[in-house]
Image: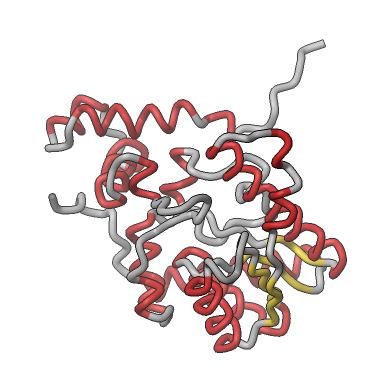
Amino acid sequence: MELPDGLLIVDYEETRRKIVKFIQEYFDKAGVSCVVMGLSGGIDSSLVATLACEALGGEKVKALLLPVDAKKDAENVRDASDLAESLGMSYELFEIGPAVEAYEPLSLGKVALGNLMARLRMAAWYGVANNRNGLVLGTGNRSEILIGYFTKYGDGGVDILPIAELYKMNVWGLARHVGVPNHICEKVPSAGLWANQTDEGEIGVSYQELDSILYLRFDIGMEPDAIVSAGYSRENVNRVLGLVSGSQHKRNPPPKATI
C-alpha cells in the first residue's frame, strides 16, 4: 500500500534547518550550559544527536548510554559510542542493571519492568542535567507520541522534543539526509525493554500503516470510515485510533480537583 500524498516531507533540508534553529533558540533562551540525552544506538536518538551537535557543537551535548547489560547489548552500545565519537560528543556508559535488580522483590511483570527501566533512564538524564546546568533533550517522534508509545515519566519526561512533529517515516528520511549511518537507519526499531521486543510487534501494525492512518485522521481530518474506504483494514484503524484515545492521559497534565 502506498503512503498517502503529503505524508512524506518534500524538503528535508528545510526541515533540518528548522529543527537546528529550534534547538539553538531554545538553548539560548533557557540560559543553560549543555543538553543531556539518552543515546541508544537507534535511529531516533541518533537523529536527535546529529541535529543537536550541529545546533550547539558536540562539546555542549552530553550523551548517556544506559543499557541494562552492556555485554548483552553490545551492538547498540558500539553504535551509540561510535556515533558520539564521530559527532564530537562527550558520552558516558552506565549500566542500569543493578538498579533494576534492586526492584526484584516487587515481582514486577514484563511491561511494568520495562517502564521501570525507562524511568530509571529518565532519572539518570535529569541527574546529570541538574549537575551540569543542562536541559534534557527528548527523542520522541509524532507517531509514538500520538499513540502513547512511550513511558509516562520515563522517556516522556524531557524538556524539549526536537523531532516530535516527524512521523516515523520522515524520521527515516531525515536521518538519511543528515548522514546517520546506514546500519543504524536499517535497524529494526526497538525500545530494547525486553528480549526480542520490537516496536511494530508491540504496536500491532507496521510503521508505514500506522503513519498513514494517523496522518489521514489527524492531519487530513478523515473520519475512521473514510480511512477504511481508502483501503485500510477496520481492525487496524480501530486499533490505532484506540491507542490514541487510550493514551490521552500521557499527553495531558495531571488532572486537578476543582475547589
Q: Quadrant of the C terminus?
A: top right
Q: Quadrant of residue 125?
A: bottom right
Task: Look at the picture and state if 78 lies above or below 104.
Answer: below
How many marks can you see?
A: 0
Judge left or right: residue 104 versus residue 168: right
Judge left or right: residue 237 versus residue 108: left
Residue under the image location 76 percent in, 47 percent down: 102
Q: Quadrant of residue 147?
A: top left
Choose between 176 and 20: the one closer to the eye. Answer: 176
Task: Look at the picture and state if 64 lies above or below 212.
Answer: below
Task: Look at the picture and state if 81 lies above or below 152.
Answer: below
Choose between 105 and 94: the one closer to the eye. Answer: 105
Judge left or right: residue 36 versus residue 211: right
Choose between 250 and 10: the one closer to the eye. Answer: 250
Residue under the image location 20 percent in, 27 percent down: 234
Judge left or right: residue 85 versus residue 135: left
Task: Look at the picture and state if 239 lies above or below 99.
Answer: above
How is this picture coloured? secondary structure
Choose between 106 and 3: the one closer to the eye. Answer: 106
Q: What is the x, y in percent for residue 250?
A: 58, 35
Residue under the image location 70 percent in, 49 percent down: 101
Q: Quadrant of residue 7?
A: bottom left
Q: What is the x, y in percent for residue 73?
A: 52, 67
Q: What is the x, y in percent for residue 255?
A: 69, 23
Furthest residue in direction top, as rendered? 259
Q: What is the x, y in percent for residue 128?
A: 80, 65
